[in-house]
């Protein structure tokens, strides 16, 4: 707990009972990834739920990144920027920007502190944010100014209801694989959608992933027949009311 006491130096002594409570709370955040409406949220992290970001305690600093809420709502990420290492931050202050095919936004610091590291790999490979937002695509690290600020961040399962609300409000869909393309048409037979899909896959390389959307009631039968005939895989399927969502992958 020495690092906890060090955060309070110059501001008085950290009460032993409070220090032990915080230490127990923060080091006990371990668990599996919880799925909320098909979107993954690891139970071992702290969350700034409204901003769609996560925080993971690393000694006297926290590592931060984006959640599935943002990863699946930006489209394909194309550009990431950071503020300079050493920048002093207050909670809610902008520490970087994120640009995707559907959205542009800023990354706001979930706590006050000093920006101590950034993930430079994201500059060259912004798509990591789509593929691995909780791992390789961490955003930055912040040296904490006041450990007490961590108390405003949420934990699972307590934060689950609000996360579920935000996913619905923002119409976020998470799937088993992130699509490279999207093919959809409503009010037509599924075969018409499949014709577009086949045309796209003819000029695509193996491994290409496509999100297929149809409101044809025969979609379940037609999509399975298409997969059997072409040898391409159905990676995921979800139904939302009358709308069918399929994630398919070109295999050869």
Image (spheres, rainbow, N blue to C red):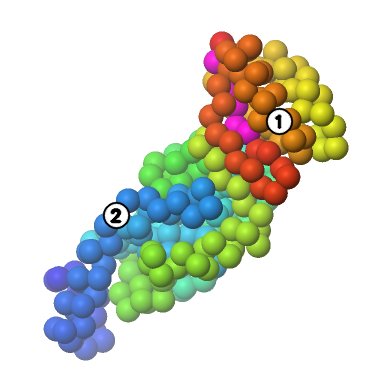
Q: Earlier in the sequence, mark 2 or mark 1?
A: 2
Find disc 1 in the rendering and name its residue.
219
Q: Which residues are magenta?
A: 246-251
Mark on residue 51? none
Lateral position of residue 49 relative to residue 216, left or right: left
Residue 142 x, y percent position in the rendering: 37, 62
- Relative image position of residue 178 (x, y in whole percent): 56, 36
Eyeballing the image, is 196 above or below 35? Answer: above
Across and down, in percent, residue 6 comes to 20, 74
- Residue at 54% across, 62% down: 164
In the picture of the structure, the residue carrying the numbered disc 2 is 31
Callout in the foreground (2, 1): 1
For the residues labelled 2 and 1, the Cα–Cα distance comes to: 37 Å
Q: Secondary structure at mark 2?
A: loop
Residue 76 vs residue 126, the one in the foreground: 76
Q: Quadrant of the N terminus?
A: bottom left
**Magenta highlight: main SS:** strand
């Amino acid at each position: 707990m020495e690092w906890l006491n060090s955060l309070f130096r110059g501001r008085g002594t950290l009460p032993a009972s409070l220090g032990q409570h915080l230490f127990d709370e923060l080091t006990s955040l371990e668990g599996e990834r919880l799925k909320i409406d098909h979107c993954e949220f690891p139970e071992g992290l702290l969350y700034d739920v409204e901003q769609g970001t996560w925080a993971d305690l690393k000694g006297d600093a926290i590592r931060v990144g984006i959640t599935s809420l943002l990863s699946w709502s930006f489209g394909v990420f194309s550009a990431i920027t950071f503020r300079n290492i050493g920048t002093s931050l207050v909670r809610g202050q902008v520490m970087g920007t994120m640009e995707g095919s559907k959205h542009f936004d800023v990354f706001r610091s979930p706590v006050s502190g000093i920006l101590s590291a950034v993930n430079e790999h994201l500059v060259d490979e912004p798509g990591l944010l789509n593929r691995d937002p909780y791992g390789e695509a961490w955003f930055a690290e912040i040296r904490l100014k006041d450990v007490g600020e961590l108390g405003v961040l949420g934990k699972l399962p307590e934060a689950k209801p609000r996360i579920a609300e935000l996913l619905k409000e923002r119409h976020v869909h998470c799937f088993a694989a992130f699509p490279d393309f999207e093919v959809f048409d409503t009010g037509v037979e599924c075969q018409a959608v499949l014709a577009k899909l086949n045309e796209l896959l003819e000029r695509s390389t193996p491994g290409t992933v496509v999100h297929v959307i149809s409101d044809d009631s025969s979609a379940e039968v037609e999509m399975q027949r298409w997969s059997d005939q072409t040898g391409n895989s159905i990676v995921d399927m979800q139904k939302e009311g009358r709308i069918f969502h399929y994630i398919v992958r070109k295999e050869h």
